[in-house]
Structure formats: C-alpha cells, structure tokens
Image (spheres, rainbow, N blue to C red):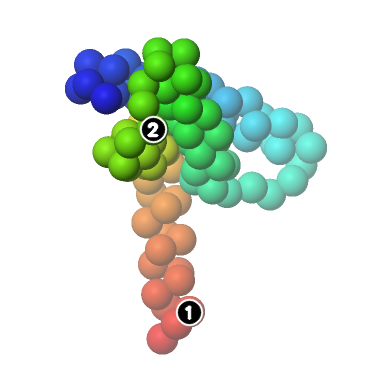
Amino acid sequence: MTITLFISIFTVGAMVSGLLTEAIKKAYQNANKDYSANVIALVDAVVVGGLGTTCAYMLLGIPWTVNNIICLFLMIVVVWVGSMIGYDKIMQLLNQLGNIREDKS
C-alpha cells in the first residue's frame, strides 16, 4: 500500500465514520437511550476502516501480504482516532480511562 492510498482511504474513512457516528448518536438521543460516543466511533471505525480498506484491496487488486494486513489494522485505528477528533469525545475517553484506573484501585 502506498502512502497516498493510505491517506486517501483514511480521509474518506474518517469522514464517513464521523458522519455515521453522529447519525447513530442522534438516533440514540431520539430514543432517549444512554450511549458512549467513543465506543460507537470505534465500532464504526472497525466497519468503515476495515471494510473500506478491504474493498480497496479487492478493487485495486492489491495482494494480501503481511504488510498490507498490518496496514488494514492500522487503518482501523487511524480512522477511529480521526472520527473521534473533537473535544467532547477525547475528554470522554480520558474520563472513562480515569474511571477504569480508579475502579481497579
């Protein structure tokens, strides 16, 4: 996978995942249900980043090498981080991590 292709998939994936995350959050708000935005963003990133990269590999005829599979998993992580860009989601993640550490003490 080239750097250009990685950045292109990341840009589209983060945008789609961010929009999908917001749509799911609105659906939960309308249903008056509790939700965790960063978990929704993670699940979206796995679906959008993983599926998008897999489709790109298939459509472009990119071989399934170890390096390309590693790039697929890296794409999931960067799409997750890219879709979480925003103060509220980052602060929520930090608070949840802090609560986990306090619970273990």
Marks 2/1: CA–CA distance: 42 Å
> Can the viewer see residue 74 in this picture?
no
Residue 103: image tag: 1
Side of 23 relative to 74 (left or right): right
Side of 60 relative to 18 (left or right): left
Pointer 2: residues within 10 angstroms few (<14), some, or many (20+)?
A: few
Pointer 1: residues within 10 angstroms few (<14), some, or many (20+)?
A: few
Residue 9, picture quadrant = top left
Where residue 10 sits: x, y (%)? 35, 24
Identified at 40% across, 16% down, the residue is: 61
Where residue 98 sits: x, y (%)? 39, 67
Identified at 43% across, 26% down, the residue is: 53
Q: Amino acid at mark 2?
A: Trp
The residue beneath circle 2 is 64
Of the 4 image quadrants, the one containing the N terminus is: top left
Q: Amino acid at mark 1?
A: Asp
**Figure check: 74 above or below 56:** below
